[in-house]
Image: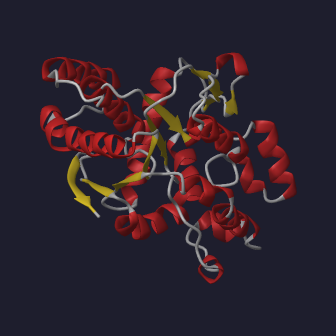
Amino acid sequence: MRVKSFNLKKTKEKYLKFIKSQETSVMSFQNKIDQLNNFYIPISEIISKDYEKHGNTRVIGLSGAQGTGKSTIAEILKIILKEKYNLETIIFSIDNFYKTLKERKKMSEKESELFLTRGVPGTHDTKILINCFKKIKKKSFKKFLIPKFDKSLDDRLKKNKWIKVKKKPHIVIFEGWCVGASAQSKSSLKKPINELERKQDKNLMWRLKVNSELQKDYKKIFKLINISIFLKVPNFKYVYQWRILQEMKLKKNSKGKKTMDNFQIKRFIMFYERITRNMLKILNLKSKLVIDIDTKHRLKSIKIN
């Protein structure tokens, strides 16, 4: 048994300290203690029990549209899992595994110009990702590296800046906007859902390739998930609003590096729209835990499927 006595005071302190570090002049967190007691602790309890039952490294899939707070929630769960249950937890963001800018340029020339923009299935290095999961699952653990991607540079960092995993984790939180997404029928791809698809993907090459990627390596990767958590937005229009806040936070932390303006963000969101809308339909029923987020960006309710 790895469960230890719950040091509520210490957990609250670390939780509140982390939350404070994430706040900006335009974004503050509300009902912090209520959110801790009603959402983060119960979710951590479910994860801990699952680990106790199986006794091997468990993969927690955390997905939701852009700006839903996946990275923040992942860090909070990591704090609680460590403080309450003494469970070594690492976070895999699918964003870390984006292909290099050079690789995406080649893909844009060969497949579709739209692949130059990172985000959709096909723009991640699934070979590296699968290899990382294999190393984690091995009984004889050996330290390894997780890639690191700089969004302000739109490129992968050099290996000497990658994340070192020195100890076999009990829990892997695998977070990303498209984690758990599934392919759609080819017939449903025909009708464009936004201006980007209508004007820049007239021959459907981009849509078909993205869908094909979801049917192959991404499907294999998502099958490794033991518990899926889906953050459900109240409406797709909030994805744009919250992505603006996310970009402001990135701008604050990137020390003057290149970030997107509101027009660029609006176009960027179009790349994600089709899969995001499909996930809202499918993962609401398919995920183990579904967390509704209200219009004020707060965790509203939790459903267990």
Looking at the picture, does residue 100 appear above or below residue 281?
A: above
Displayed quadrant of residue 182: bottom right
Displayed quadrant of residue 69: top left
Tell whether 130 sits left or right of 112: left
Q: Count of labels shown?
A: 0
For the point 36% across and 30% down, the residue is 78
For the point 49% across and 50% down, the residue is 177
Q: Can residue 290 be seen in this view?
A: yes
Q: Can residue 23 be seen in this view?
A: no
Split into 4 quadrants, where in the image is the N terminus?
top left
Q: Please name whichever residue, 103 or 94, is drawn nearer the observer in this view of the structure.
A: 94
Split into 4 quadrants, where in the image is the C terminus?
bottom left
For the point 48% across and 21% down, the residue is 253
- The x, y position of residue 274, in whole percent, is 54, 66
Q: Please name whichever residue, 20 or 137, is drawn nearer the observer in this view of the structure.
A: 137
Please say which color scheme the image uses: secondary structure
Tell whether 173 sits left or right of 156: left
Identity of the residue furthest to the bottom in this view? 187
Tell whether 254 sits left or right of 173: right
- The x, y position of residue 155, in whole percent, is 70, 32
- The x, y position of residue 265, in whole percent, is 53, 46
For the point 36% across and 41% down, the residue is 51
